[in-house]
Amino acid sequence: MASSSEPPNPGQLSPLSGVHRHITTHDKDGKAIFHSSEPGDWVTYTPSMAFDVVYTTSASPPNMNNDIDISNHESVRNSGKLGLVNPNGSVCRIVDFGPSTSEEHSKGVMHRTQSLDYGIVLEGEVECRLDSGEKRVMRRGDVAVQRGTMHEWHNTSSTEWARMIFVLLDSEKVQVAGKELGEDLSGGGEKVAEAMKSQR
């Protein structure tokens, strides 16, 4: 396990370092100040997966005047309606993946979101699997650019936790050979989306 500079957050499933969100804003003179600093707010999906929604936006480009985007984020977060993607906006989410200690834990959740996603490995080693059978092993600092494709994530370690951060940007539906490829959560992603709606 990677050395932890911070103890895990309250309610955090993994033993990895706790995370904190620091939001900036401006004072009345236009100087940059911190609006708030909060520990991660984790939701457990399974005994081997948990996530923390860092921030959301509900428009592109977002309106940051008078902290409107912060108010919108708090409304979305408390609505109980946020799925994997925030329509017309974005979601920044941290996901912890437990060790693959059994066949069940080694199975990912094959899914497609209607979004352009940046997935960055923060801790451990994660395998990105596509529905074509192609795979890539990602290590700390590696980035996956998911462009509306069917995929799943798999922690390659049987002993250590892994962590990724994702930024999902709502997108137009992808069309291939005249077929529209919209959101597909039939591989289990619908359960993840429902669990995410429980985050407050």
Image (cartoon, rainbow, N blue to C red):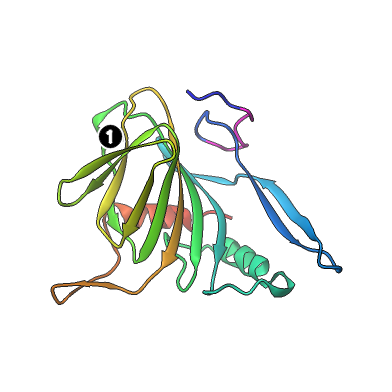
Residue in the picture at 40% in, 35% down: 48
Q: Is 105 located above or below residue 128 in the figure?
A: above
Between residues 148 and 77, which one lies in front from this camera angle? 148
Q: Which residues are magenta?
A: 5-12
Residue in the picture at 63% in, 28% down: 5
Q: Is 84 located above or below residue 10 in the figure?
A: below
Q: Is 124 located above or below residue 120 in the figure?
A: above
Main SS category, magenta section: loop
Q: Measured from the top left, where is residue 107 in percent x and y?
A: 26, 39
Q: Is residue 162 left or right of residue 179?
A: right
Q: Residue furthest right?
A: 29
Q: Measured from the top left, where is residue 177 in percent x and y?
A: 13, 73
Q: Secondary structure at mark 1?
A: helix
- For the C terminus, the quadrant is bottom right
Examine the image and state in which quarter residue 12 appears.
top right
- Give amino acid for label 1: Ser
Q: Is residue 90 left or right of residue 108?
A: right
Examine the image and state in which quarter residue 23 appears.
bottom right
Q: Is residue 170 visible?
A: yes
Residue in the picture at 27% in, 69% down: 182
The verdict on residue 6 being magenta is yes
Residue in the picture at 41% in, 25% down: 160
Q: Is residue 40 left or right of residue 179?
A: right
The verdict on residue 167 being magenta is no
Q: Is residue 22 left or right of residue 92?
A: right
Count of residue discs: 1
Find disc 1 in the rendering and name its residue.
106
Q: Is 117 located above or below residue 67 in the figure?
A: above
Q: Measured from the top left, where is residue 102 in percent x and y?
A: 28, 28
